[in-house]
Amino acid sequence: MKQNDKKQLTSSQEKKKICAESGVIVAVALLLCYFFGFSYVYNTEYGVEAGVNGWNYIFACFSWTFKSSASIYGDGLAVPFNYYAKYFVRILSIATTVSFVTILVFTVLTVLNIVKFNKKIEIASMIILYVIAFIFLVCIVTALAMNGSDILPIYCSGNPKCSIATLTFIPFSVSLIAAISHTVFIRKSLPTLDD
């Protein structure tokens, strides 16, 4: 009987460790996604013509311009995004910055959970992952809504081969899958988890 209890305890501790450590992988994956094109002009003939990544949007949230970030993170491109889609750029800048801060909070909770597992922290982490997924959904909708801005008619001269695309569906998918995985882990393990 004691040996069986010991096996269950070891199994429970291993599950806690795996769940907590997987949070670090999720956080790193999400932060790497900020190097992707959060919005870009895609031409079916030439490929990507102009784009803005997540780091550009974070910088734009504090400066409202891409000019200074050009030397650090690619071309930055005040044109066409900041000139022809200012309203969308501001929404994306705020949403991207909020998602970044939320990921940092998730990372801190994950590190605390690795140091000492706590089911309340695990539940908070799960909720934060759903919040992150929702914010990235806002980013997707906002980036795609740029197709209705002045970028295509002015910058692209109405070229039917051009459209505005986004890769924010990748961090959205990562955060949603991680949130669902955390939910499954908590639902299966919550009765046996000890603080």
Image (cartoon, grey):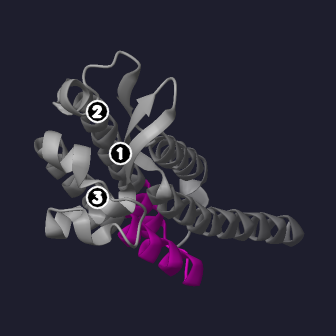
10 Å crowding of disc 3: few (<14), some (14-19), many (20+): many
User: Alpha-carbon distance for marks 2 and 3?
Assistant: 15 Å
Name the residue located 20 percent from the left edge and 24 percent from the top edge: 153
- The mark found on residue 63 in the picture is none
Q: Position of residue 168 (x, y in %)?
A: 42, 43
User: Alpha-carbon distance for marks 1 and 3?
Assistant: 13 Å
Q: Position of residue 119 (x, y in %)?
A: 48, 66
- The residue pinned by badge 2 equals 141
Look at the picture and state if 193 lies above or below 90: below
- The residue pinned by badge 3 equals 57
Residues at marks 2 and 1 touching, judged by CB atoms closer than 8 Å: no
| Viewer-side residue, 102 vs 1 | 102
The stretch in magenta equals 103-126
Could you tell me the amino acid type at mark 1? Phe
Q: Quadrant of residue 150?
A: top left
| Viewer-side residue, 127 vs 50 | 50
10 Å crowding of disc 2: few (<14), some (14-19), many (20+): some
First in residue order: circle 2 vs circle 1:
1
In the image, taking residue 14 as reference, residue 32 lies left or right, namely left
Name the residue located 43 percent from the left edge and 77 percent from the top edge: 108
Could you tell me the amino acid type at mark 2? Val
- The residue pinned by badge 1 equals 136
Q: Position of residue 7 (x, y in %)?
A: 83, 66
Could you tell me the amino acid type at mark 3? Tyr
Foreground mark, 2 or 3, reads 3
In the image, taking residue 173 as reference, residue 7 lies left or right, namely right
Say what secondary structure mark 1 lies in: helix
> Does residue 119 show up magenta in the picture?
yes
Q: Position of residue 100 (x, y in %)?
A: 35, 64
